[in-house]
Image (cartoon, rainbow, N blue to C red):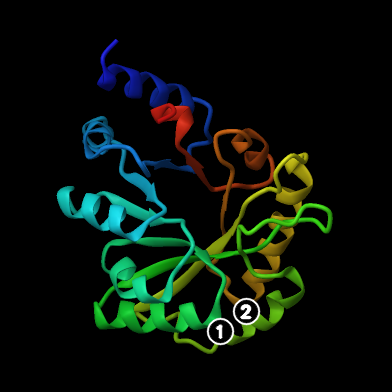
Amino acid sequence: MNRSDEIASALASIKSELPEQCTLIVVTKTFPISDVEILYRLGHRDCGENRDEEGASKSAAMPDDLRWHFQGQIQSKKIKSIASWADYIHSLDDLGHASKLERAARDLNKTLKAFIQINLDTDDNRTQRGGVDPSRLDEFLDEVGKFNTEGPKGISICGVMGIAPLHEDPAPAFARLQEFSQRVQEWFPQAKAISAGMSGDYKIALNFGATHIRLGSSILGHR
């Protein structure tokens, strides 16, 4: 089986399991542009990258109707570049970054859709994955709400994102994320999307309202 057939088979298998309204983001980080080209020929239009340099390079080589999702840790010095190629940001968890992304998007005359990443770690399982501390979520929402997020350009809060803690049952974490989604909608009624679930836990995330799942190895295999 050639590479195109491999990807086509895996993509079809995953999509057959997903609700119609669920967006599948194929995480193409570290994979060659040839894999992105195969995905595009197969009709897939949502790809995810974790690094600005890689995302910028791949997006420049692909047609404009491919939607790019940035899901890595945001660095201030990379914000202008990220805003230039990404359509969605899945890892917004810093007010300074939010302000810079807002300005960068306006300078580019574009709307950049953003998921607020919420830290789902438990007291016994702390990682460096980032995310807004739940105890400060209301404060974060209040500050971001002062931006002109309903305007025609800038950042538009579209939902929440979360990563389940390692080596734990992901269900409680995704249940909390679903609850946080309701809180976010009190500030931003349009922010109904939930970005949750990767190759190892996406089926569980779907049970808790995930509208966007981010899969890499399930479709492209391991590098």
Q: From the top left corner, tell me how far across and down residue 76 is, in percent.
A: 42, 76
Residue 54: numbered disc: none
Q: From the top left corner, tell me how far across and down residue 108 is, in percent.
A: 24, 77
Q: Quadrant of residue 133?
A: bottom right
Q: Secondary structure at mark 2?
A: helix
Distance Cα–Cα, label 2 vs label 1: 6 Å
Residue pictured at 77% horizontal, 39% vertical: 169
Residue 141: numbered disc: 2
Observer able to see residue 65: no
Local crowd size for mark 1, using a 10 Å CA cut-off: few (<14), some (14–19), many (≥20):
some
Mark 2–mark 1 contact, CB under 8 Å?
yes
Which residue reaches farthest top? 1
131 left or right, relative to 122: left
6 left or right, relative to 97: left
Residue pictured at 24% horizontal, 37% vertical: 40
Residue 145: numbered disc: 1
Which residue reaches farthest right? 124
Q: Quadrant of residue 77?
A: bottom left
Local crowd size for mark 2, using a 10 Å CA cut-off: few (<14), some (14–19), many (≥20):
some
Q: From the top left corner, tell me how far across and down residue 44 is, in percent.
A: 31, 37
84 left or right, relative to 145: left
Residue pictured at 68% horizontal, 83% vertical: 139
Residue pictured at 48% horizontal, 28% vertical: 218
Quadrant for the N terminus, please. top left
> Residue 99 versus residue 188: which sits nearer the camera?
99
Amino acid at pointer 2: Leu
* Vertical relation: 24 (above or below) 131: above
Q: Quadrant of residue 204?
A: top right
Q: Secondary structure at mark 1?
A: loop
Q: From the top left corner, tell me how far across and down residue 191 is, in percent.
A: 55, 66
Quadrant for the C terminus, please. top left
Amino acid at pointer 1: Gly
